[in-house]
Structure formats: structure tokens, C-alpha cells
Image: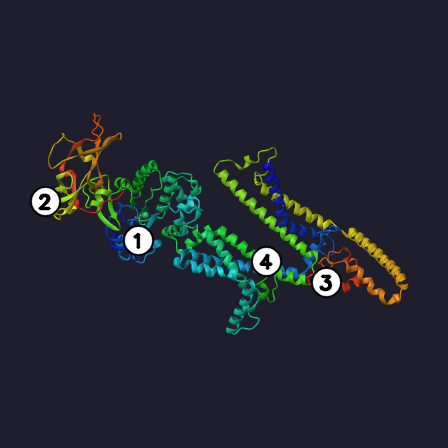
Amino acid sequence: MNNSAIRISIWIYLAIFFAYLLGPLVIMSVTAFNSSEFPRATPWECLTFEWFSALFQDERILNGIKNSIIIGFGTIVLSVSMGLAGALMLTQIWPKLRATYYTIIIAPILIPGVVLGISTLVFWDRVNRMLGLGADSFLSSGLFLTVIGQSTFIASYCMLVLVARLQRYEIVQTEAALDLGATHAQAFRKVMLPFMRPAIASAAVLAFLASFENYNTTTFTFGEYPTLTIELAQKVRYGITPAISALAFIIVVLTVFAAVANEANIKRKELAAAARRGETTVGQVSGGGIRLPRFLAGNSAAVLLVILCIGTITVVGTATAYSPDQCVADIREQKRLEADERIQELRRKRDEENIRKFKGVFDPEDIAPEEEAAPATGGNDSGFGGVFDPNALSGQEESEAPSTEGNDSGFGGVFDPNSLSSE
Amino acid sequence: MSAGVGVDLENIWIRFGDFVAVRDANVNINGGDFFSFLGPSGCGKTTILRAVSGFLEPSEGNVLIGGQNMQGFGPNKRPTALIFQNLALFPLMKVWENITFSLEIKGASSAERRKRADELLDMIALPGQGDKLPSELSGGQKQRVAIARALCAEPDVLLLDEPLSALDLKLRQHMRTELREIQQRVGITFIYITHDQGEALTMSDDIAVMKAGVIDQIADGRTIYNDPSTAFCASFVGENNVFRGKVKKVSGDHAMISTNRSGDLMARISTANQGKMKEGDDAMMFIRPEALALAPEGAQGDHFVTAQVTNEEFEGNSFNIFMEGDGGKEIKVSLPNLGQSFDSHRGQPMTLEYEVDNAVVVPAGELATE
Ligand SMILES: Nc1ncnc2c1ncn2[C@@H]1O[C@H](COP(=O)(O)OP(=O)(O)O)[C@@H](O)[C@H]1O
Ligand SMILES: [Mg+2]
């Protein structure tokens, strides 16, 4: 009984944990398919894929992605090679200075990215001027500076990954290669590099991801080449659309895809190894009635991968054929009706008030317009500045306008839906 | 005698900082020989081998291979191949790729390499195993792959660093024969390192016995066993009983030793020390367990030893008797089991005799610790 209580609490814990971890992503993904002008899951309006096409038509986002990818690859090349050099140094040379050297190499991770960004800028600007080059030289190009700036600390990450593997490398392997006639270069290429390959791949992925998501350092170095994070940050300043959710959704799907594909690949290798040892043949594993193709047999990750592929194709297919126009029109109609109703309501209220005030001293015509705006925003102190107020988008520009002044939500109007409509 | 390439070490000193790992080594290895360095672990055997293969330059002295001074030649420029103590097979390469790594370096085609790998796999009795990974092989199989990989490079000298130490006893004994056969078939010089005197004795043409960086004796196995030049050699190679004492009288190549416990005993001065020992010198006399035999009780003379029996055991091919010896060490007697009856003497004194020529005298020195 006690046991089952523990089990239940573990499940609850796991549920909360994953909700915390994945909840925001799920919500964000859902908002990518809602036709609402602002990213939100409720109220659900219409299923739409328009945000994806909006995303792919957004020149700045696309350009940002392109720059991010170019910089990502540049960072991979630079960081992995610097990391490998550092790792070799750490494990094979200078055994006495190891601790000192390690500290120096790790330091960039501990230095704030902002500082690295500024110092990269300042340093290379100096170098540029010392070489007597102009402001449009390669050394002052945003691509170069960003790759250099990011690599200052990403190389340290790479080095940590590579050192872990290198510590398991037996130097006697290199000696064996030398003894068999290999030059040092051949021994490195044919023996040590293949051993390091998995770690190099991990380091490359890590470097790319770290580069892709970097903002702090890049913000000082990007110059004419804003990356995706820079573009997103600039966009947020003027308010965001669900196109961003669409981008997030695509990234999530790609990540899941890569993870599952990787898992499937590992599993496949394991099965192949098992088959080679003769423990079991790949065909036998599938067991049950249906005989799966060789690639899938006994490999649940591969099955999942195939399902994912089919799912993606289906969704994309549906998306090209699907048109939410009717629904959107309905919603718009409905909103118009609601708005009309509200206007009616307000009118009615005003009339009532006029009548009430008319009984008083003042002339009703003087005061009415101001009083009219108050009820629309007065009760909204949720901190989101009316962002999640369903009425916000109902087209009451004239009544919303004054409310922004009193908005102390801390977002400085970033999420203000009005900025959307003004674009 | 043979056509192979010889190796000469001339006045080799190897130092690591202040520590002297090898002290003035002089060795001439004939081409085509199976030569062993035998010594306890840490005595500098691997260090010597690394100097021969080019992984370290001696602090002083020269390594000559085929008469050519190897100074300045890196390991990839020397006609040697080394079989490492832990084999150092390439874990990510298949067996055939491992074996023909030296050919890949020379730019041989894949087909060529496969063909050569198959030949070598046949030679090491692992046909058809070329596509396995080293991790899928047993210890003995890995051993043979390492040998094939080294031989594929067609070295003039094959260097082996305790290659059998990781194997179990049965396999070790089997591999001894196999290694010796391979050596005779390929006809190249083998330099073999071991701390196991059984391996050295069974396989080698010549053996160098090492102690803490110093080579004590270089000779064939029989000489080393029967005619050791130092107390260390006598005590390290095979079992031996030591009698400490002083030289009482030297007559020709024999000497009378007044031992600490067993009175005056006669023995032969080992060849290396003849003419060098004089009366009053501290000496050690060694008699092998199998060189002692039962004597009539109470017999006296310069080749009789009487002592208290402390323990007896039956080992199948022999009866072993342990008696109180010198300096806390037991005297071991090994009587061959020829079906004779044997009365227990435990706790009683017993008298033994030996042939004077089977007892060897060397100057007193450090004994091998086991
Ligand atoms: N690179 C080195 N630096 C310092 N000391 C070393 C080095 N290599 C070996 N030694 C020392 O030299 C001695 C001989 O080592 P080695 O040749 O490996 O002995 P073994 O006879 O067991 O093969 C040992 O005491 C070892 O500690
Ligand atoms: Mg060694």
C-alpha cells in the first residue's frame, strides 16, 4: 500500500516535471495553428497554416536563419578545431602546467557573454586599424566577428567534450601506428581521429546549438549580419505574431526528429552487432505475426521515426490542400457581431448614463467620451496589458489607446496588440 | 650463422631525470636469434626495448641495427616492429585492417591488403576471422593478430614486450611453442622481454638477465641456469638454495666455503668469477633443489649438509622437503618420485649430499626477492 503511494507520487512528480519542461513548448506549438493574430491557444479560433507561410515570407527571419546557419558552421569549424587543439595540449603536453592551463582554457565559460562580445569587438577593431584596413574589411565583417566572438567560449565547451574522450585514448595506439611506419600526421588521421570521431560529432552539434541560440555575444558583433536570435529580439520589440510559434514548432519537430533518428541509428547498430555475434539474427527479433522490414524489426525508435515521417507528410499535404478561409470569415463575422453588440451595449449604457447625469448639474456631452473608455480597460490589471483580454482585438482602437499609458506590466508595451495592428 | 639482421647496444645509458633506468648496457644480438631480456618488473626491460624501437633516445651510447647507427631515426624509420605489452590493436579497425595497417600506410590497394591479410591469418591459424573487430576475439587470438600485424610490416627485428603476460597458463605454454615456431619460420631476429624465466629458458637462444637497470649476465639458458655469474642470476633464474659464508680456500676452479650454518662446504666457482675470488671474500653458494640427495644419517664431509626438517610435501613428480636454512630462508630439496618409499622426517634432522660440481660459488650479492 505504502509502495503504491510512492509509485503514485512518483508519477505525479514526473507529470509535473514534464509539464514544466514541455508545457510551454506544447502551448507554443499549438498557437502556431491558431488563426488568432496573437500567439495564444485559447480561445481557439480556426485551424490555420497561414503562420507557416507568413514565416516563410518573412525576409528578415529567413535572412536571420541563413546568417545563423552560416555562423553556426563557421563556429563549428573554428571551435572544434580549437577545442581539439586545446584538448590535445591538455592531455598530452605540459603535464605539470595542466591545472593552470585548464583554468585558463575554461575561463571564457565563466566570463559573461556580453563581456566577450564587447572585447571581441574592441580587440578586432584595434587589429583592423593596426593593419590599416577600412571599416568594410573582412576583419570587421559581422560574420567574422560573430564566429570569432562565439568561438571564444564555445571552443571551451568543445574542449571539455573532447578531453573527456581523449582521456580514454591510449597514447600507445599512436605509438603502434608510428612503429608500423606511419608518420605523425598519418597516425593522427588514421588512428586518433577515428577514435575521436563520436566526440567530434558531439562537439560539433554542441557548437552549432550554442552558436544558434547565442544572443549576448552576438548582439555586439553581428554588424550587417543579424542572426535569428537578433531578429527575434528585434521583432519582439514591436510585438510578435504566431509566425514565431510556427518557427518554434518547426525547431521542436526537427529536434524530435533528430533525437529519434539518432536513437534509431544507435539501435540499428546494436542489433547489427548482436546479429554479427550470432546471438540473434535481425529477422528473428520481430517475433509477432507481422513481419516488419529488416530496418524496422525490433527497433521501436525506427518505427517511431517512420510514423513521424508519415505524420509530417500528412500534415504538410493537408496544409497545402486545406483552406481556413471559410472559418476565418465566420470568425471575423462573429467578431464583428460581438463588436457591434458591444458598441450597442456601450451606447445603451451611455444613453442610460446620460439620462442619469442629465438629471445632474453637468452637461452630458462634455464628459461622455472619456467615461466611455474607462470601463473597457479599467478592470484590467492582469499585468499583461490587455494582451489576453479577448476584447483587445475586437477593433476598439479608439477605446484602447489611452489604456497603454497606464500599462505598468513591465513589458513596455512589447506585447501590446496595438503595435501589431499598426504594422 | 644465420642471415638475419643483428642488433648491438653499445654503452647504453638511459636516464629519466636523476633516475638511471638503464646503466651501461652492452649487448650483441646475432641476426636471426631469439634473444630475451629477463628481469623482474621495473628493471628497465621496456625502456631498453623502447630505445631499440626508437621511442626514446638513449642518454648515452648507441643502438645499431644491422651495423647501422640508429641515432636520429624515429620509430617509423627503423626496421623494427614492436608488439606492445598491452598489444595496442586498433579497436575501431577490423582484424584484417589491423593486420595490414603498415600496407595502408604504404598506399597498397584494398584488394592487395585483403590478400596479404588472408595469408597472414592462415599463418596464425585464424582463417576467415578477418572481418571481426579486435574486441570480438579472445586473448590468445588478439595476441596472434598483434603478431601478424607486426610481421606484415616485414621488420628485420621483431620486438616483443611481455606478450604472453596477459594470457592464462595453458595458453601461455602453447603460445611459447608457437612463437618459437613462427620465429624459426620467418627467420628474423626476435627480441623478447619477460619476467618469466620459464619463457626465457624455453624459447631463447640467448638471455640477458637484468637487475635494476644493470645487465648481470648474457648467455644461453643452460649457462645461466647452471653457471650463473651473480647471486642475483642464481637466485632469479629457477629455484635455488643459498648458503652464505666466506671463502676459506681456493684451489683451481673450486673453493672451500665456511658457511654460516652448515660448516665447510666445497663448491665450484662460477666461470665468470674464476680467478677473481680469494680467501676471506664474502661468498654465496647455490645448490638447486634437484641437486640435493638423501645421504646416510650423520655423514660428515665437505659435500654433506645436515639440517632440521620443517615441512614436507608431495608434488606428484617429486617429494619436496623443506629444511631450516640460512638467514630465515628454507632449504628446499626436491627428490624425484621414482616410486620409492619415503619416511617422514618432520621435526628431525636430515643429512643430504650433493655433487661438488653442482654447487656454484659467486661473490656475495643481492638476491632476487620474490
Ligand atoms: N618515462 C619515464 N619517466 C620516468 N621514469 C620512467 C619512465 N619510463 C620508465 N621509467 C622508470 O624506469 C624503470 C624501468 O621501467 P620499465 O623499463 O618499464 O620496466 P620493466 O622492466 O618492468 O619493463 C621503472 O622504475 C620506471 O618507473
Ligand atoms: Mg615492461
Q: In the image, what residue type sits under mark 2?
A: Val
Q: In the image, what residue type sits under mark 1?
A: Ala
Q: Quadrant of residue A264?
A: top right
Cα–Cα gap, marks 3 and 1: 81 Å
Q: Earlier in the sequence, mark 1 or mark 2?
A: 1
The secondary structure type at the circle numbered 2 is: strand
Labels 3 and 4 within one chain: yes
Left or right of B344? Residue A241 is right
Chain at tag 2: B
Q: In the image, what residue type sits under mark 3?
A: Asn
Q: Residue B242, image x and y in percent?
A: 19, 41
Left or right of A362? Residue A291 is left
The secondary structure type at the circle numbered 3 is: loop
Q: Residue A155, image x and y in percent?
A: 50, 59
How many marks the image carries: the answer is 4
x 30%, y 41%: residue: B185
x 86%, y 67%: residue: A366
Chain at tag 3: A
- Circle 4 packing at 10 Å, graded few (<14), some (14-19), many (20+), is some
Cα–Cα gap, marks 3 and 4: 31 Å
Cα–Cα gap, marks 3 and 2: 116 Å
Left or right of B296? Residue B221 is right
- Circle 1 packing at 10 Å, graded few (<14), some (14-19), many (20+), is many
Chain at tag 1: B
Cα–Cα gap, marks 1 and 2: 42 Å
Q: Could you say which disc has been placed on residue B250 in the image? A: 2
Residue named by callout 3: A407
Q: Could you say which disc has been placed on residue A213 in the image? A: 4
Q: Earlier in the sequence, mark 3 or mark 4?
A: 4
Residue named by callout 1: B51
Q: Quadrant of the N terminus of chain B?
A: top left
Q: Is residue A76 above or below residue B112?
A: below
